[in-house]
Amino acid sequence: MLKLRKSMMTLSAPTAQPATLRRLDTSNAATLVHLSASFEDLQTVLRCCERLVSALTPGDDPPDDVLIEAVWTTALLSYGRCFSYGRAGANLTENDLAATNLKGDLPDWHRVLLKLRDHYTSRTTNPRELFSVGLAQDPDGAANGIAITSARQPLVEDLAVRQTGAIALALSDMVDARITALQPKIFAEYKDTPKSELDKLPRFEVSDTP
């Protein structure tokens, strides 16, 4: 059963949350779907960054490499999707980064994040270590054996995580404002539609549980 997003604006005042809804299949509804997915992705980026800041804080034990890579990869994937929905008005662009009024060269950092996403999700390249094979020689120069070496890639730094979190927070506010502005427009398209026509729309069940 689908979950009802509690933060959605209610345009009328029902006595209880609806158990069923009518599915809308309009251009504005599709845009709202993508905006909502983008907002959830940005919230995931924020939660990942919070977890990473905690995991990277110096302590008695060394950082958990597996945890940090997993959470950072999730953050990068979630961030990148927000710029890839492909629907005008739904996907974010570099112009939106400028509109956040955050300091720093945001377009450059944005491109770095997308490159890191591709690096950590490569199907052919190990993102953690760079391996090399070398030939060992004895004192006379004759081949003596084969050695495999590796160079460990550094973990993401705290500053990079905090900067990414700041961008995600600003973009979340922007997307949330677009969601709020679009909902009454969609409602206006249907508020005077006869019940006989509304009943023709496909029905689906929802849940208001967290």
Image: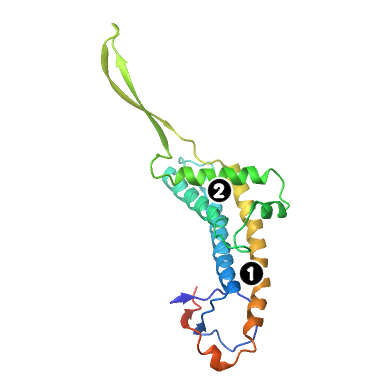
Q: Where is residue 157 shown, x and y percent of the image?
A: 55, 40
Residue placed at 48% from the left, 79% from the top?
A: 206
Most foreground residue, 190 or 49: 190
Q: Give the labeled residue for mark 2.
A: 53
- Name the kind of residue labelled 2 in the image: Val
Q: Where is residue 156 shown, x and y percent of the image?
A: 52, 41
Which quadrant holds residue 29? bottom right
Left or right, 60 with reference to 10 = left
Which numbered disc covers residue 207?
Answer: none
Residue 135 visible within the image: yes
Residue placed at 49% from the left, 84% from the top?
A: 20
Most foreground residue, 186 or 26: 26
Q: Are marks 1 and 2 in contact (CB under 8 Å)?
A: no
- Name the kind of residue labelled 1 in the image: Ile
> Label 1 vs label 2: CA separation?
29 Å
Most foreground residue, 142 or 163: 142
Left or right, 154 with reference to 149 = right
Residue placed at 59% from the left, 92% from the top?
A: 194
Q: Give the labeled residue for mark 1.
A: 179
Q: Quadrant of the N terminus?
A: bottom left
Q: Closer to the N terminus: mark 1 or mark 2?
A: 2
Colour style of the rendered protein structure:
rainbow
Relative to residue 151, is residue 138 depicted above or below? above
